[in-house]
Image: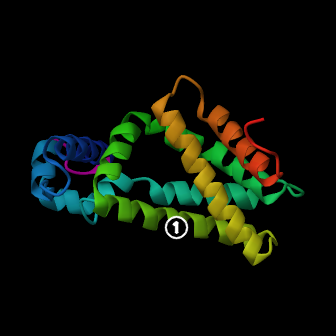
């Protein structure tokens, strides 16, 4: 069995998800995850600082990808258009993790400590996006509002996509951002 590298990391993620679903997050130990993956507990901790982080693997890559996309966006785009472009560019990370996404979402929804961690991670990502927008010259209050509204819209789109992946993530993103613009345009809903 592999003890390090990408294959071991993948096996640890899969083992953790299986055990969390079988026993619940709170009743699963890192030793059990390592054993199921065929590695030592020490190897587990080479890859993840704690058992929660298994479910948030890739967050740093996503943050880096998003902020880089914001900084590299063409000049003249509005903040929400910059964010939509960045979220579409980051879609490949999400698409790679689709088989993991639905059970992950359900597990987080059912576990208070994971919901808390998810909210903290979301706030960190939104703040990173806000900083990237500020670096492009967007005023602080607008950068923060756009980043948080954009992140919520991205989450809305990805949850819809996870539930029904028959359409591409880009379609859900386009629809969610169109809905956000409709809400901001003062259009009467339901007409």
What coloring was used for the rendering?
A: rainbow
Q: Is residue 154 left or right of residue 60?
A: right
Q: Is residue 182 left or right of residue 46?
A: right
Figure check: 191 above or below 109? above
Judge by depth and name the residue closer to the eye, 35 or 127: 127
Q: So how many labels did they put on this image?
A: 1
List x then y, in percent, for residue 152: 59, 55
Residue beneath label 1, please?
A: 123
List x then y, in percent, for residue 28: 13, 53
**From the image, which quarter does the N terminus lie in?**
top left
Q: Is residue 76 left or right of residue 37?
A: right
Q: Is residue 93 left or right of residue 51?
A: right
Does the segment drawn in magenta span residue 4? yes
Figure check: 15 above or below 45? above
In the image, farthest residue toward the top: 166
Q: Secondary structure at mark 1?
A: helix
Q: Quadrant of residue 51?
A: bottom left
Figure check: 99 above or below 48? above
Does the segment drawn in magenta span residue 155? no
Circle 1 Cα neighbour tier, 10 Å, few/some/many (<14 / 14–19 / ≥20): some
Residue at 46% from the left image edge and 57% from the top image edge: 59
Whether residue 15 is visible to the viewer of this picture, yes or no, is yes
Q: Quadrant of residue 141?
A: bottom right
Q: Which residues are magenta?
A: 1-5
List x then y, in percent, for residue 41: 13, 58
**From the image, which quarter does the C terminus lie in?**
top right
| Majority secondary structure in the magenta region | loop
Residue at 63% from the left image edge and 63% from the top image edge: 148
């Amino acid at each position: 069995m592999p003890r390090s590298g990408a294959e071991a990391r993948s096996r640890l993620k899969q083992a953790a998800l299986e055990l969390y679903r079988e026993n619940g997050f709170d009743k699963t130990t890192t030793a059990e995850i390592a054993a199921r993956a065929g590695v030592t507990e020490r190897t587990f901790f080479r890859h993840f600082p704690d058992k929660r982080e298994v479910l948030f693997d890739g967050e740093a890559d996503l943050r880096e990808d998003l902020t880089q996309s914001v900084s590299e966006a063409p000049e003249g785009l509005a903040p929400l258009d910059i964010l939509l472009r960045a979220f579409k560019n980051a879609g490949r990370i999400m698409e790679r993790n689709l088989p993991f996404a639905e059970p992950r979402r359900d597990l987080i929804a059912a576990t208070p400590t994971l919901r808390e961690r998810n909210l903290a991670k979301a706030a960190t990502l939104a703040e990173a996006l806000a900083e990237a927008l500020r670096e492009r010259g967007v005023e602080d209050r607008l950068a923060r509002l756009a980043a948080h509204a954009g992140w919520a819209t991205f989450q809305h789109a990805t949850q819809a996509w996870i539930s029904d992946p028959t359409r591409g993530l880009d379609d859900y993103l386009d629809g969610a951002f169109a809905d956000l613009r409709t809400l901001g345009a003062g259009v009467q809903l339901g007409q």
